[in-house]
Amino acid sequence: MKLEAIGVVHSIFTVQTGTPVQPAFASGKDTGTVEVFEPFEEGLDDLERFDRIWLLCWLDRSGPSRMKVVPYLDTETRGLFSTRSPSRPNPIGMSAVRLLRREGRFLHVAELDILDGTPLLDIKPYSAHIDVFPAAEEGWLGERVQRRVEADERFGKES
Amino acid sequence: MKLEAIGVVHSIFTVQTGTPVQPAFASGKDTGTVEVFEPFEEGLDDLERFDRIWLLCWLDRSGPSRMKVVPYLDTETRGLFSTRSPSRPNPIGMSAVRLLRREGRFLHVAELDILDGTPLLDIKPYSAHIDVFPAAEEGWLGERVQRRVEADERFGKES
């Protein structure tokens, strides 16, 4: 199971503290550019007509994985896999960002929650027919959400 | 960027042909068990209260990546990254399956679209607050969906 970067995310965010913790808690001003490397450019065709896309990234600045964490959205300790915290055994981030426009192998995006320089692993189209499910019980998360939520240093290499 | 399997998916599906192409096109009878390896069991705490979970898997039986594909849901050739086809540079599958119950390090799930024996990379909670976005334009996908869609052999190793 070997990964290769297919591109890199260029973002206004350079440190975890202050970065939105999810696209859903980001704003239209949280912007960036997704650079896709040349061998993969042709795979971007037909993507322009999607308003939203999943970016799968390698969260290269997350700390070692821990099975118990206090997530950004909570004040209690939770099992890691019941959270979206970045310090995971396989630190793969899933971000449904807004696609503004494509320019060749560059995608201009907003509602971004990804640090500058993060390696890109995959892009998938966001589809209401595939990704939206009727209101489901969502454990501790359902009780804790606010409007805009920013990260701090708790999942960094130093913590 | 090295991956390690944190578990394995046990499923009623052993070949691509006939397997649902997404949880959204699967049914409650499409069931399986997600086995999480012992070092990661504690990370499953608090997951029981979620109705739905994301499984990130390594699609080990998908063929070599191609930048142009005819996806299961369409009859026209599309750019790979505008599709959810499994033959990708990094064959990471994202499946929002229904969580029925947890028994220790085993999760019983339904609405499954994953082949038996597939390596598990990550589990994340599905949250309407994080994963659901208001109706967005979704390119060719918006025009093509049906109720239950099954795979065939087109993204296998032999194709």
Image (cartoon, coloured by chain):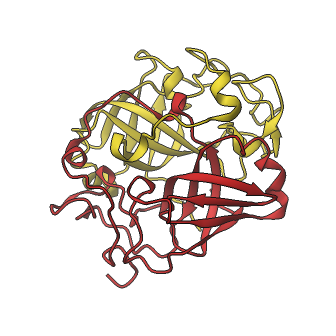
Chain colours: A yellow, B red
Q: Residue at x 50, y 66 (%)?
A: B30
Split into 4 quadrants, where in the image is the C terminus of chain B?
Answer: bottom left
Tell me: residue A46, above or below residue B56: above
Q: Quadrant of the N terminus of chain B?
A: bottom right
Q: Residue A55: x, y in percent? A: 45, 42
Q: Position of residue A82 (x, y in %)?
A: 70, 41
| Residue in the foreground of this view, choosing between A3 and B151 | B151
Q: Residue shown at 20%/52% (left/top)?
A: B144
State whether residue A143 is above or below residue A5.
above
Relative horizontal placement of residue A48, taking residue B20 as reference (left or right): left
For this view, does A72 lie left or right of residue A131? Answer: right
Q: Is residue A113 visible?
A: no
Which residue sits furthest left?
B76
**Measured from the top left, where is residue B28 in percent x and y?**
50, 59
With respect to residue A80, does A21 lie above or below? above
**Outermost residue toward the bottom in this view:** B158
Q: Is residue B23 shown to the viewer in this render? A: yes
Q: Nearer the viewer, residue B136 or A1?
A: B136
Nearer the observer, A95 or B2? A95
Indicate the quadrant where residue B77 lies.
bottom left
The image shows a total of numbered marks equal to 0
Name the residue rendered at 60%, 26% in the picture. Answer: A21
Quarter of the image where one finds residue A128 = top left
| Residue A146 percent location from the top left of the image | 60, 15
Q: Is residue B127 above or below residue A57?
A: above
Residue A102 located left or right of residue A14: left
Q: Residue at x 42, y 15 (%)?
A: A29
